[in-house]
Amino acid sequence: MHGIFRRYLMQGKWKIRNAGIKKPETQNIKTYNNKMSNVKKAEGKLGVMVVGLGAVTTTFMTGVLMTRKGLAKPVGSMTQYDKIRVGEGADKKYLKYNEIVPIADLNDIVFGAWDVYPANAYESTIHAEVLKEKDVNPVKDELEAIKPLKAAFDHNYAKRLDGDNIMVGKTRWEMVEQLREDIRNFKKENGVDRVVVLWAASTEVYVPVNEEVHYKLADLEAAMKADDKENIAPSMCYAYAALTEGCPFIMGAPNTTVDIPAMWELAEKTKMPIAGKDFKTGQTLVKSGFAPIIGTRCLGLNGWFSTNILGNRDGLVLDEPANFRTKEVSKLSTLESILVPEDQPDLYGVNCGGEGNEHNGYYHKVRINYYPPRNDNKEGWDNIDIFGWMGYPMQIKINFLCRDSILAAPLCLDLVLLSDLAARCGRYGIQRFLSFFLKSPMHDYTKDEVPVNHLFQQYVMLKNAIREMGGYHADEPID
Ligand SMILES: NC(=O)c1ccc[n+]([C@@H]2O[C@H](COP(=O)([O-])OP(=O)(O)OC[C@H]3O[C@@H](n4cnc5c(N)ncnc54)[C@H](O)[C@@H]3O)[C@@H](O)[C@H]2O)c1
């Protein structure tokens, strides 16, 4: 054991920071020795099968195809742009990820998808109205060839959707079997060696974790076979099928899908990486980057009120209270581990949020309102009530006019490429180093692990994992 990992162990933090990150037994790490020797090369094609062919997915696909033709730049993608330090002192170098680890080439990606609506990827891209036609038409043929497979769908999980490109009359277990066959066929038809499955479909209604069904793999499988529609969301069928077929699975929505011990058990069994939940794109990205300013400067917080208007299909689905509940839980979790009431009671503890406040400290509220005129161009407002010396109050206002899918697309690319890399490195289970990209990072809550939400700590975790997979020291401590 070396560097940072030993340090965490000594601090008793090993379990918290690194749980779920499995070090391959064969990995032989030498100091600053960039051999990449124990990482399988990214040979052959990489299949990317996306659940949901909506705004995010089509923006992601179009961007990759346009980049391949040299007609666009993959701005915002860490795997394509970021350079990180490896080595120290005279050995210090700043390298791009693919100079440290073997990352799949964009030219090797083959896309597939499932969706509730039958529109192909070109029609869907035009419908989403995120991109201008001039940025889509050069890859029209390639997009038209991406036709969605029938969705494993249950209307009760997304009431506002009424498409008919769905599997009809199938039990949950039959959905799993069909999805497994879809993946196998996709591999065969496209000559693909490896597939990553990414969920970029609508947010499902909130499924509370039920210990009797979601804690053990055997119970989960029994519930699928018994067609337990209440406890088994369609997304769980996709995840189960992916992991069983040897594909990493990424949850880009806030669904609890793989955030349950039974799925962790399956990921251990099949030795596959899982990542989730919920792409960290706009407001939460700002929040996880801004909250550390307040915490680092030892300022107090009375309340943080976040609201958004959004007019795309995602906004429509989230207008349904049961679907919004899933998103709300995910968005609220961000501040809890950055500004911790128990650590600093004077600054964030009881009564900071005002009298009669049922919150255990500062008041934190998040709203999303469906507002069609804005389509994908979300506008978010944050009002932050802070206090300083002797308790004197101040306010901070943030107004972010963003583009949802433009921010999400590079996250899709990075999550896919890094999950594929993790699988080739023999990493499996929850990939905590991918927390950087996610709003509500997965962690083993049955063992009281604390998620890392602090953007810059997440970045250190990401860099250390890349260094380690590349055969360098994971030498940057997290304070
Ligand atoms: N864009 C962002 O900034 C952002 C950030 C975080 C999370 N997300 C999440 O990403 C997801 C996609 O967002 P979007 O804007 O592309 O939404 P969208 O509504 O444009 O696309 C989602 C697609 O998923 C399909 N779908 C729903 N259930 C399905 C199922 N069971 N099987 C197959 N297809 C299914 C829908 O028909 C739709 O076409 C949403 O869950 C959203 O909450 C987006």
Image (cartoon, rainbow, N blue to C red):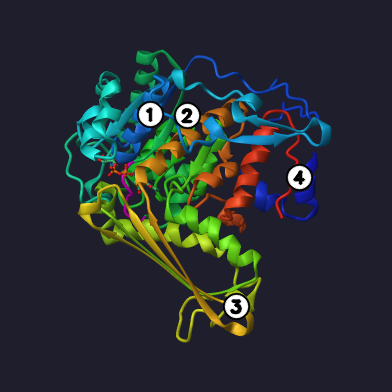
Instruction: Residue at the far right: name it.
Output: 90
If the image is split into quadrants, where does the N terminus sit? Answer: top right
> Which mark's residue is nearer the viewer, 2 or 3?
3
The answer to which of 403 and 355 lies nearer the viewer is 403
The amino acid sitting under disc 4 is: Ile
Q: Quadrant of ligand 1?
A: top left
Check disc 1 and report the residue beneath it: 49
CB atoms at circles 2 and 1 under 8 Å apart? yes
Q: Name the residue at 22% across, 34% down.
A: 126
Q: Name the residue at 42% across, 60% down.
A: 329
Q: Earlier in the sequence, mark 3 or mark 1?
A: 1
> Which mark's residue is nearer the viewer, 3 or 4?
3
Q: Secondary structure at mark 3?
A: loop
Q: Is mark 2 within 8 Å of ligand 1?
A: no
Query: Where does residue 36 sit, x and y in percent of width and height?
Result: 69, 22
The amino acid sitting under disc 3 is: Gly
Assess disc 4: are there few (<14), some (14-19) or many (≥20) residues with their C-alpha within 10 Å of its C-alpha: some
Q: Earlier in the sequence, mark 1 or mark 4?
A: 4
